[in-house]
Image (tube, helix red, strand yellow):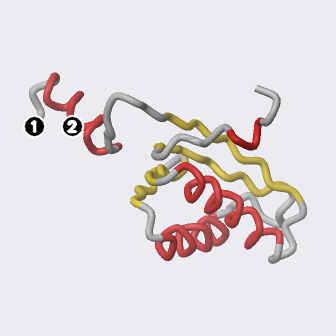
Amino acid sequence: MDNIASIPTPPHCTADFCLIPIGTSSPSVSAQIADVQRLVEKSGLKFVMHSAGTTLEGPWDKVHQVIGQAHTILHQQGIVRIQTDIRVGSRTDKEQSFEDKVNKVRSLLGQQ
């Protein structure tokens, strides 16, 4: 493992991220989150926004690029500090969408 540049990233992932602008003039960050959602919509990635963040699904590098771009667009608005919590999952045995995961649990609960 001398050349870490030769280690590829996983081909597909699901990432849940919660971007937190710090030091804004208001406790509400809905305007900034709306800007992030516009970016996500243009990214071409599969996504779902929820009350505590956004779930992205797609190629590893693209998913992480979009999260980085979200930081950049808010920094460009003058937000000096941003903290983001990210939870990322990948599998090698099959490609499983975030909807597949939720639907599996719903079926076990008899909600399908």
What residue do we see at 87% from left, 56% from top?
81
Place residue 58 in its image quadrant: bottom left
Task: Tell me the CA gap for discs 2 and 1.
Answer: 7 Å
Q: What element carries label 2?
A: helix
What residue do we see at 77% from left, 64% from top?
26
> The disc labelled 1 sits on which kind of residue?
Gln
Horizontal side of residue 97 vs 74, given as left or right: left
Q: Label 2: which residue?
A: 103
Q: Which of 23 and 88 is in front in this view?
A: 88
Percent x, y for residue 10? Answer: 53, 40
> The disc labelled 2 sits on which kind of residue?
Asn
Q: Is mark 1 on a helix, strand or loop?
A: loop
Percent x, y for residue 20? Answer: 72, 52
Horizontal side of residue 51 vs 99, given as left or right: right
- Rendered position, 80 above or below 105: below
Percent x, y for residue 31? Answer: 64, 72
Horizontal side of residue 34 vs 71, given as left or right: left
- Rendered position, 28 above or below 31: above
What residue do we see at 50% from left, 34% from top?
89
Place residue 85 in its image quadrant: top right
**Quarter of the image containing the C terminus?**
top left
- Outermost residue to the right: 80
Q: Label 1: which residue?
A: 112
Horizontal side of residue 94 vs 74, given as left or right: left
What residue do we see at 75% from left, 43% from top?
5
